[in-house]
Amino acid sequence: MGKYIFRRFLDLIPTLFVVATIVFIITRLIPGNPAAVMLGPTASVEDIEKLTAQLGLNDSYIVQFLNYLKGVIQGDFGMSLSYNQPVTTLILERFPNTLILAISALSIALLIGIPAGMIAASKQNSFVDYIVMLVSLVGVSMPIFWLGVMLVLYFSVNLGWLPATGMGSLDDGIVPFIKHLILPSIALATIPMATFARITRSSMLEVVSKEYIKTARAKGVREFIVITKHALKNALTPILTVLGMQVSGLLGGAVLTETIFSWPGMGRLIVDAIEKRDFVVVQGTVLFIAIIFVLINLLVDILYKVVNPRVNYESKGGEK
């Protein structure tokens, strides 16, 4: 187990290198001169050229890339061109806000999606099963940006129940804070919730057909105990796989949600940075999200062993 975790840590290095390279290339393809954007439309050509040289934008791409990698290895994502702050500081300021939104959305998705999938599996081919599958199909197909706009129009504009944008402060009380959190959380949770319902149902259906489940039922074990104790535990492995992907997707999907609801997280930071041609911020935030992504997937692999001790990491060259 220890050797496997160490090897996976080593695997992260080429993965992150590829991500850093791709992000560097794409950000250089964004049209527009960051110096011109920073100085505004009234800036003279001389001022733009002077600032361009100060920012090191006249260096070759290879020199810029090597300087960028050197900083990343040292834990320095660079200095923002538009905010005039270290990118690491900006990320640490915004990441807690994104994390709050992601945890809230994930909680909604898990608390509704997994029980819905369990109920659908236990009542296969019933009216309840069809309703759960229909709703989950609609949920997984619904674009986040469209759902976010509809939620704002209905609950904020028409009914006036919830604020449309912004993030509440805990200094103003827990109720305003939660009110600001509800709509973006629902919008962000819809697709993961539908995905959890579908994967839980299919995984549970496969497990409940096993002999030990039939034996438990034959012994008179209550159906609730059979489903929650015996079937769910053995159906968790594919759910954990989806969980890792959805947590990572929530961080990435927060870009659209935070933009719609003006949520001051990393997604909003990336959008603002793209508008300002601040490619240093874009590089840093995307690479930070990639690091979170690979670490979450590593954690999921470790949880496989916790949930199912029969998983053998040392066989087949270390693969489970």
Image: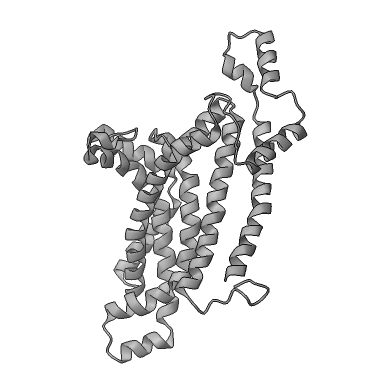
Which quarter of the rendered picture does the C terminus lie within?
Answer: bottom right
Tell me if residue 16 comes above or below residue 42 in the rendering. below
Residue at point 59%, 43% (across, down): 287
Which quarter of the rendered picture does the N terminus lie within?
Answer: bottom right
Where's residue 196, x and y in %?
41, 61
Where's residue 165, x and y in %?
34, 33
Residue at point 53%, 36% (across, down): 88
Horizontal arrangement in the rendering, residue 93 relative to residue 88 (left or right): left
Q: Nearer the viewer, residue 199 or 41?
A: 41
Residue at point 24%, 37% (across, down): 176
Picture quadrant where residue 275 is located: top right
Picture quadrant where residue 81 is located: top right
Q: Nearer the viewer, residue 229 or 171?
A: 171
Residue 126 seen in render: yes
Q: Nearer the viewer, residue 50 or 167?
A: 50
Tell me if residue 192 comes above or below residue 84 in the rendering. below
Horizontal arrangement in the rendering, residue 256 relative to residue 229 (left or right): right
Residue 124 seen in render: no
Horizontal arrangement in the rendering, residue 38 relative to residue 173 (left or right): right
Where's residue 253, x and y in %?
47, 45
Tell me if residue 63 comes above or below residue 307 in the rendering. above
Residue at point 47%, 75% (across, down): 308
